[in-house]
Image (cartoon, grey):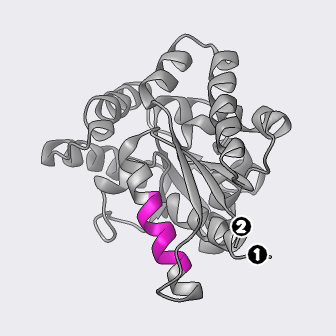
Amino acid sequence: MKKLGLIGGTGPESTLIYYRRLHESVQKAAGETVIPPMTIENLSAFRVFEYLEQGDVEKLHDYLLAGINSLAAAGAEFAALSANTTHIVFDRLRESSPLPLISSIDSTRRAVAESGARSVALLGTRFTMVNDFLAGPLRQDGVHVAIPDDEEIAYIQEKIATELELGAVKAETRAGFLRIIDRLIADDAVELVILACTELPILFPPGTLPVPGLDTIDPHVEDLTREILRR
């Protein structure tokens, strides 16, 4: 097996989900006694948000690269980022990384294509929704990407930063998100909701959305499992 290096902490809740699902996925494929070789470098979601609020993608790149260098020093053979938002600098990071990187964006793009959906709602941090690093590739594939309006984006970002990153799940927050989703379904004929912040699955477990949902962790874990088991 190949050793995975995972940039975690961005945020902590999604890191726990990645850890658990990677074990489950590898054991399903290779046997229940098989433990995936893995090292996690725990960074800070709040520092990521700080750099992005400042518009300082250079500092964000360097922060993530330092984490990847630590993973390489620990013997990782390839690496991944456990947050969609950090993929805002993925292309540059891929060029400077000492390790091969597996992109969550590529995994999500594949999963949307396999779903057959032609109109999707994109929910994530403000930086994921207002930038083009995820919506752009989907649009290149001919998929209509519905984005919340400015007021809704501000609401979503606040709830991610002040609740979900801290592991807090509130019924009123779920209801607020559902109002946004219902509007996007009505206005844009949305067939699939992309949960493109890796904390959103704690708010919306499987079967709790009015249309099918895509947890971006799932296809990413599939691709990471494939690479772990590749020799």
* Image marks 2 and 1: residues in contact by CB distance under 8 Å: yes
In the rendered image, the vertical position of residue 34 relative to residue 110, given as above or below: below
Q: Does the magenta stretch include residue 25?
A: yes
Magenta range: 18-26
- Viewer-side residue, 20 vs 188: 20
**Which residue type does callout 1 highlight?**
Arg
Answer whether residue 84 is visible to the viewer in this image.
Answer: yes
**Image x and y of residue 120, in percent:** 54, 56
Task: Give the dominant element type of the magenta stretch: helix, strand or loop.
Answer: helix
Q: Mark 2 points at which residue?
A: 2
Residue 230's label in the rendered image is: 1
Q: How many numbered marks, from 0 up? A: 2
**Image x and y of residue 11, in percent:** 42, 40
In the image, taking residue 30 as reference, residue 169 lies left or right, namely: left
Q: Residue at x 52, y 74 (%)?
A: 35
In the rendered image, the vertical position of residue 213 relative to residue 79, given as above or below: below
